[in-house]
Image (tube, grey):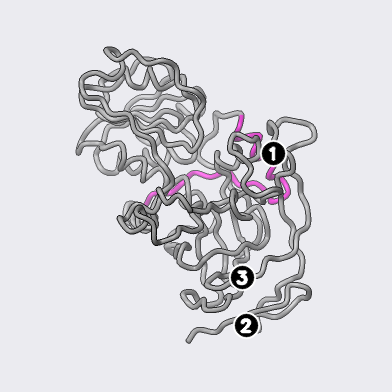
């Protein structure tokens, strides 16, 4: 059996003779959701007790945490409050420092990833049919439970991932949501072999989906408002890059909408070839305008949403990213500047993903 470490959160203790767990940790929490540019900010830097791992959970010392658009939706109130004063963050890389009761999947010191999907029930129709991403009882890191804008986090061991050694801890962080969700959206978009794929928005998730597609011989066309993002797309190998409402230079077999802007949907559908699929990849989308059946939906076009991912999606993506040498472009922020990183994300025109550096390891 692997060693089980439990501890009293009221005092500092040694774990495995090598690492001391403090009683308190620094963290960012959402106070009252509001626009990120508000004064005061909707997120505050605070101190919290270090969490105690429950049955089948592990305690992780956080090394890095990616900044995801969903974090912005949580902070700004686009998503309803599920856990008051929640600590955001769900693209987490860290080291296992303690095992809760009955936890034994990981050794102390193992580097693991903590993703958006925290828990599913395992017994509903969706879980039993391989569609656990649709589980009505599912829980999410950084929304239903405290996440990775903190020095420590807990995770049910069955929902964590081993991280390929090829990725350093900052580079690996966006893989845990931007990468996995982008991969799931890519699959939902039904891109044909050698086909043409449109990507609307070009942040953390889209630039990873683009790399997967290009590595497999798919022609990628990018639609984004930011000039820097357009240049970045072309540098990665996109065939074209233009504004989000511009006509496509070619008919597209498939498209993925990453930008949370419903107004883009009609234009994206117009740019599709007959039989094409548009996948909506975000957890939040502003209202979609009225659609004209003849212009937007006829000719067997498919409009589909994307909800979270299964653990199988995650394992497949991490294996594929390692094999294809998919590497996120990241901008590193110190832990103390999470609010600044979120503001940067909200303003758009970024290259790749923002990542908080929380500790060494």
Kindly indicate whether the residue at mark 1 contacts the one at mark 3 (C-beta within 8 angstroms). no
Q: Secondary structure at mark 2?
A: loop
**Mark 1 lies on residue:** 340
Q: From the image, state whether disc 3 or disc 2 is nearer to you.
A: 3
Circle on res. 53:
3
Circle on res. 249:
none
Decide: few, some or many residues near mark 1? Use Cα within 10 Å; few <14, some 14-19, many ≥20: some
Decide: few, some or many residues near mark 2? Use Cα within 10 Å; few <14, some 14-19, many ≥20: some
Compared with residue 147, is residue 183 higher up or lower down, i.e. above or below? above
**Mark 2 lies on residue:** 16
Q: Secondary structure at mark 1?
A: helix
Indicate left or right for 283 with 240 as reference: right
What residue sits 53% from the left and 42% below the top? Answer: 353
Q: Which mark is first along the chain, 1 or 3? A: 3
Residue ranking furthest to the bottom:
1
Compared with residue 265, is residue 95 higher up or lower down, i.e. above or below? below
Residue ranking furthest to the front:
124
Instruction: Tell me where the magenta segment starts and ends, as one range.
Output: 325-346
**Percent of width and height locating residue 18:** 65, 80
In the image, 293 versus 39, the foreground residue is 293
Is residue 338 one of those drawn in magenta? yes
């Amino acid at each position: 059996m692997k060693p089980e470490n439990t501890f009293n959160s009221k005092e500092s203790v040694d774990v495995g003779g090598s690492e001391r767990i403090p009683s308190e940790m620094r963290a960012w929490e959402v106070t009252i959701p509001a626009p990120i540019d508000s004064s005061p900010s909707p997120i505050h830097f605070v101190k919290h007790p270090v969490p105690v791992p429950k049955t089948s959970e592990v305690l992780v010392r956080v090394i890095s945490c990616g900044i995801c658009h969903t974090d912005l939706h949580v902070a700004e109130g686009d998503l309803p409050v599920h856990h008051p004063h929640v600590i955001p963050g769900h693209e987490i890389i860290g080291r296992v420092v303690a095992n809760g009761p009955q936890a034994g999947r990981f050794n102390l010191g193992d580097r693991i990833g903590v993703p958006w999907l925290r828990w599913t029930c395992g017994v509903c129709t969706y879980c039993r049919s391989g569609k656990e991403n649709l589980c009505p009882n599912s829980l999410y890191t950084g929304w239903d439970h405290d996440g990775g804008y903190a020095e420590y986090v807990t995770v049910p061991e069955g929902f964590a991932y081993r991280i390929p050694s090829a990725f350093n801890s900052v580079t690996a962080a966006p893989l845990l949501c931007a990468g996995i969700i982008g991969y799931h959206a890519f699959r939902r978009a039904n891109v044909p072999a050698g086909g043409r794929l449109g990507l609307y928005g070009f942040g953390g998730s889209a630039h990873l989906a683009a790399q997967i597609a290009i590595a497999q011989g798919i022609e990628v066309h990018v639609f984004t408002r930011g000039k820097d993002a357009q240049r970045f797309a072309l540098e990665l190998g996109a065939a074209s890059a233009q504004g989000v409402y511009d006509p496509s230079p070619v008919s597209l077999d498939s498209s993925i909408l990453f930008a949370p802007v419903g107004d883009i949907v009609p234009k994206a559908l117009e740019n599709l070839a007959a039989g094409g699929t548009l996948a909506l990849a975000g957890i939040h989308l502003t209202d979609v305008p009225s659609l004209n059946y003849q212009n937007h939906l006829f000719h067997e076009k498919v409009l589909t949403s994307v909800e979270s991912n299964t653990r199988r999606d995650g394992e497949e993506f991490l294996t594929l990213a390692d094999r294809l040498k998919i590497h996120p472009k990241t901008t590193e922020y110190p832990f103390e500047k999470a609010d600044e990183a979120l503001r940067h994300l909200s303003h758009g025109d970024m290259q790749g993903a923002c990542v908080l550096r929380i500790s060494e390891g």
